Image (cartoon, grey):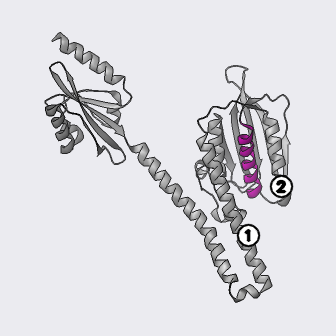
Amino acid sequence: MCRNSNLDISLETLINSIGSAVLVFDKSLTVRYFNKEAEKIILQLRKNLAAEAIFNNKKISSQILDCLKTNKSNFNKIRYRTTASKEVAVNIKSLRESKVNLAVVTLSDLSPLSEAKMMRSDFVSNVSHEIRSPLTSIIGFVETLQGPVGEDKEKREEFLRVISNEANRMTNLVSDLLSLSLVEAKEKREIKGRVKPKEVVKSAIEAVKPLTVKKNKKIIFEDVENISEIPGHQDNLLRVFINLLENSLYYSEENSTITVSIKKIFSSDSEAETGVEISVNDKSSGIPSEEIPRLTERFYRVDRSRSRIEGGTGLGLAIVKHILLRHNGKLSIESIRGKGSTFTVHLPS
């Protein structure tokens, strides 16, 4: 009796230390032990509940019984849907301790895997759609130029201009896809370098100067003295502010001014400097509040037709988000309809 009691204690301690969902069944096919992870997956789980009542699945109950009788582990994973939105893999193993014969059932949540597959499928579908559109235009205009219309100089120049624009759209899309892939691959890597935030912002403003002139707009940088260096990757953060500035240049009102400001962040309970905030403010028609949470999604555009006209790929803010995740930073967006939008980057020191 003492030995069984000690076994109970050691088994409970063991399964509670495991990060996966674990249930232990005895020869009567009732659950003897389970951990908190199992409770998260199977609601209203309690001791001495029958396997069939827990899983409502005769195949799983049969496999547990077979495992107990033969003392052999079943490594064939069984897919089992606990709820409409959650699917798990069931793995059954034999555990024999002295005269006690038990079956250990582990549950692996397949929901993240399913979500990842769905995201990958959506991503491939979106990329295909984005590439198909310019390709269709290019092929259509090339075929037209190969006919009698190609003899018309004005039409030829017009069609070639459209082909050039569509080709540039595809080039931008491929470039942004490669950038996104690269920043996602490096998202978990530690940042080792340090940068001067003001210099990064100035470099970004200089980089978008041709677009600023083309759009007949102005960028004002509200400089602040004594901004400290922060941990950061120079090229990555440069890409963040180029993307934000280009976004504002494309969507702000004609002949308007974009204001970039930088300030230090201090701890709320002390005077310690904890980082910097860099904001890009534009005068635009604004963004509907319900659209703001989706702005950093891949290929999401508030105004799809205008984005395509401007050559946008719908990946700029997604790239910004992933770069900032690597820097332990974040992007916040505020917008007032008819007045404009402010994109603020928060970076720790």
Who comes first in sequence, dot 2 or dot 1?
Answer: 1
Nearer to us: label 2 or label 1: 1
- Give the structural element (helix, strand or loop) at label 1: helix
Quadrant holding the C terminus: top right
Name the outermost residue toward the bottom: 148
Residue 339, visible in the rendered structure: no
**Left or right of residue 164, residue 219 in this image:** right
Above or below, comparing residue 108 to residue 162 in the picture: above
Up-down: is 117 above or below 266? below
Q: CA distance from mark 2 to mark 1?
A: 22 Å
- Amino acid type for the residue under numbered disc 1: Ser
Which residue is label 2 attached to? 212
Q: Amino acid at mark 2?
A: Thr
Residue found at the far top of this picture: 2
Task: Answer few, some or many: residues within 10 Å of disc 2's Cα (few below 14, many 20 plus, some between 14 and 19).
Answer: many
Q: Is residue 122 visible?
A: yes
Q: Residue at x 72, y 87 (%)?
A: 149
* Extent of the magenta region: 233-251
**Image coordinates for residue 122, horizontal then vertical, percent:** 50, 56
Give 135 or 218, whichever is nearer the viewer. Answer: 135
Please give the residue where the numbered disc 1 appears in the rendered image. Answer: 164
Q: Position of residue 106 (x, y in %)?
A: 30, 34
Quadrant in the rendering for residue 59: top left
